[in-house]
Amino acid sequence: MSGRDLFCQPRRFGRGAALTLVFASVLVAGAATGSLPGPERKSPAGAARSAAPGPRHEDVAAAAADAMAAGTSPVEAAERAVSRSGDRWGAIYSEGEYEEFEEALDGRYTGVGLWAGRRGDGVEVTKVRPGSPAAEAGIRAGDRLRSVDGETTDDRPVSEVVAALRGDAEEAAAGTSVVVGLQRGERTWELTLRRARLSTDPVTVREAGDGVTVIRIASFTKGSGKAVRAALRRASAAGVVLDLRGNPGGLVTEAVTAASAFLDGGLVATYDVDGDQRALHAEPGGDTGRPLVALVDGGTMSAAELLTGALQDRGRAVVVGSRTFGKGSVQMPSRLPDGSVAELTVGHYRTPSGRSVDGRGIAPDLEADQQVLRRAETVLSGLGDS
């Protein structure tokens, strides 16, 4: 599963086809897992609702309770209430789906261990996790993924393809199987893969040469912020590239910890809670001496945009790439009477300079669609000489 696609799964309101991204949230993860301290763990709907219209949690809970009393599906009733509200990022999770979501935030998931991306008119395997079911079956990067369980991948969003590989939360336990159709050159074949419990590597580090260390953050799962700080301490290079391309977000506390690696304290972002503005601050003592370039693209979302905005507004990094996705809304989860979970939009966050990200994204300082890393290295060499 790729950094972008690992945590992307279709959410269907009223069993329709309105897609949202499971992992692309700002504060929902903190509220759900207790990673935000004190009063910031709760985000009741208040003045922020005027900027992000949607149903109240109690209204959705009432719809679910009425459905239970009538002997109909509470999940479907809640989904209809959210769908009618126009809340783009609102979602209803069954109990099993939400457990899977929380496992993903812990860096664990059930799957076959491959990354996928769209190439031309098809879906291609971009990476295979060593030791995973996909690796043991001989699948390689560059293989074309033609079908999943008999359904073609042509013209399907990659997020749907990856969701099919993982399966529905209630049915996709470790040991369950999925049939994939593959093509390598002129050869086509089918394989049956058995899903397994896997862990993610959200932070990877490599030396690019010429005094440059590349730190890639694939997602903000638990421990990723600490891993960034550790990688930066070990790096001997004179310049750093922080690769946030395809990062769908995750735990906002991890993004703030990552920001603390590069900032000497100060503001990271603000957000509204019940009409009151709250602030997220970096811890003091970060590495502020080495030149830093942040790489972004249209798959840079949510908490990754929060980090990008902080580094850009604070003058700490030159941002290179293409405009980010524009997911700057705040969700709050609540448990419904049947054990399912409603995740509803209650507000938006802003960068240190007060910029709103939602629906706009963050524009890079330097546009680059090709040879992005080389452009970043050129920028770093200039910053090092200044």
Image (cartoon, helix red, strand yellow):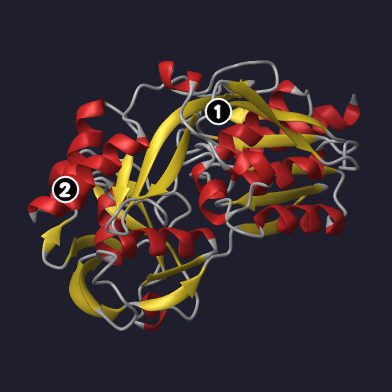
Q: Which one is in front, 29 or 65?
A: 65
**Residue 62 in view (yes/no):** yes
Element type at marker 2?
A: helix
Q: Residues within 10 Å of mark 2 (few under 14, many from 20)?
A: some
Q: Is residue 124 above or below residue 109?
A: above
Q: Quadrant of residue 380?
A: top right
Give how far apart the Cα atoms at labels 2 and 1 are. 44 Å
Disc 2 + disc 1, Cβ < 8 Å? no
Q: In this figure, which residue is indicated by the disc labeled 1?
A: 368
Give the side of residue 344 with respect to residue 106, left or right. Answer: left
Q: Residue at 57%, 33% (x, y): give it.
A: 305
User: Could you say where residue 201 lies in the image, as x and y percent from the top left?
Assistant: 58, 64
Q: Quadrant of the N terminus?
A: bottom left
Q: Residue at 67%, 36% (x, y): give it.
A: 294
**Residue 323 in view (yes/no):** no
Q: Amino acid at mark 2?
A: Glu
Tell me the tag on residue 188.
Answer: none
User: Could you say where residue 314 lies in the image, as x and y percent from the top left?
Assistant: 77, 24
Q: Quadrant of the C terminus?
A: top right
Q: Residue at 25%, 35% (x, y): give it.
A: 82
Q: Is residue 90 above or below residue 365?
A: below
Element type at marker 1?
A: loop
Q: In this figure, which residue is indicated by the disc labeled 2?
A: 76
